[in-house]
Image (spheres, rainbow, N blue to C red):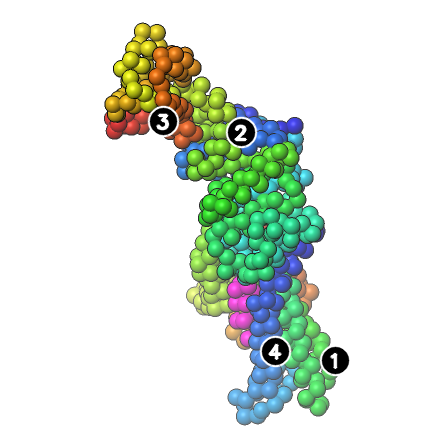
Amino acid sequence: MSCFELTQVHYRYDRQPVLRDLSLALAPGQILGLFGHNGAGKTTTIKLILGLLTPDQGRLSVLGGEAGDASVARHIGYLPENVMFYPQLSGREILRYFARLKRVSETQVPELLAQVGLTDAADRRVRTYSKGMRQRLGLAQALLGSPRLLMLDEPTVGLDPVATAELYRLLQRLRDNGTGIVLCSHVLPGVEPYIDQAAILSAGQLQACGDLAQLRRQADMPVRLSLRSGRGDGLLSALNGHIPTLSTLQPGPDTLVVEVRASDKMAAIEALLGAGGVDDLQVHQPTLEDLYCHFIQAPSSADAADHQGGV
Amino acid sequence: MTAIWTIARKELNDSLRNRWLLAIAVVFATLAMGIAWFGAAASGSVGYVTTPATIASLASLGIFLIPLIALLLAYDAIVGEDEGGTLLLLLTYPLSRGQLLLGKFLGHGLILALATLLGFGLAGVAIVMLVDDVAVVPLALALGRFILSSVLLGWGFVALAYLVSVRVSEKPVAAGLALAVWFLFVLVFDLLLLGTLVAGEGAIRPDLLPWLLLLNPTDIYRLLNIVAFGDASQLTGVLSLGADLPFGAGGLWLALLVWVAVPFTGAWALFRNRRI
């Protein structure tokens, strides 16, 4: 059973399409990164899955049931962006309140507070919390009742690097225990190592979805090879003839930067190494950020032209 | 039910913590005592006069205070949660919008009922203990009726506050509108009614006039607390219309209940359509 499955979902607001023909699914034990500019439809997608909105068209099932059903909602954890909570209550009181509302045992509360590192601040009023501490309280709240689907909207905002690393370790542990996780973030390099799948939304449409390898194949963006060698020109001739290069650059006397098509990557590396005399080789694959920019620009030709003009 | 009670209990705890409950009770008790002792000061005497006069004075004050307190207590019920980001969160919990609103109402309703009972109840006890020749049973009955009608009036205005709170998206707007509701029912309505009567010069069917009073819960509340003593001469201003009402206290109680149920149902319906 999938954590959620949207099939050809359309959603309009004030007659403006917000989501168009969106099909997206998440299997248990997977981390899905949901990316897109502000207004691309990420929040709407999350609200649909949470049952706060209903699709105009298309089908949507969540944890094998109806989105928004009480029996489904009990197994979902959600961390909204920028939640202030109740300033006059302490962290412990707030978690207890939400535990009661979710009908889970309040004995989880001290455990969860420890897990997010708030034990010492548990009895202080939330008014005195820093942004990062509120964020961690929100995370503890999302983890109440060991959810089977966890939706996190910008979970690392306000967290220091150590807390961020801890968060990702925690998410990996949950994933290994079979929790499906949706992660919305603008910090693409931060999430790249941790996500199993990425979904890129732009203007209400899904531009690409899959793991990084699939996205790279789909984007077919050049792979950059940086080499250090005493005989740069000789190396180039090893490629010339049978492997097309997209660009070559010689920034220094003994360095060479070659861009080749992704499908030619291995052949190019073999040819270069075969020519001998290579001291160092670095392979730069397109990063999540590169892929994101690629897919975001794809739908709007005017935008793409602008960017090319700038380069 | 558990969810509704969880929310109500939080409201109740909040009001204990920020001392709202205590403050309201103290205000009510102080005013009740003040009116009981000094209500007749204008006519040159200090001390307890009569139960009907005291209750009538209390009711005149109650129509100003109780709606104001109820509106202040409840105006941010939904919009406040929305601004703090917790409304979005609460609605992802196994909890319907109706349950959330009902829980808020139960909490706010209990706060108001407790404060009214405590404040005016203590004042009643003090009167019985300090005034030698007061008849206890009539006082208890009149005060009981006054407390019950005050609670119902308060609940009505809590529901009116929700009507505002579910509709707007900013707390200051909700506060402004709540104040406007107060002005409308407490100050403007009677003036409008009086103005219409005078300007209409009898054009309005006379048998229709008493019914117009039912359009304002504060008028119903005043009628209830004055008519009960069977002394129609106490009815002044627009309230004199109430002397011709074709129904008795039972109808007035029912009307006050309707003024709780209708705004609450309206708030519920609007809340269901609120975009989160």
Secondary-structure class at tag 3: helix
- Cα separation, mark 3 vs mark 2, equals 23 Å
Tag 1: residue type? Val
Q: Residues within 10 Å of mark 2 (few under 14, many from 20)?
A: some
Q: Residues within 10 Å of mark 3 (few under 14, many from 20)?
A: some
* Quadrant location of the C terminus of chain A in the rendered image: top left
Tag 2: residue type? Asp
Tell me: A52 left or right of A101.
left
Q: Can you give x and y, in whole percent of width and height, for residue A158 in the image?
A: 46, 48
Residue found at x 50% / y 60%: A128
- Mark 1–mark 2 contact, CB under 8 Å? no
Is residue A194 shown to the viewer in this render?
Answer: yes
Which residue is under mark 3?
Answer: A297
Q: Can you give x and y, in whole percent of width and height, for residue B36 in the image?
A: 61, 84
- Mark 1–mark 3 contact, CB under 8 Å? no
Which residue is under mark 2?
Answer: A196
Q: How many marks?
A: 4
- Cα separation, mark 4 vs mark 3, equals 69 Å
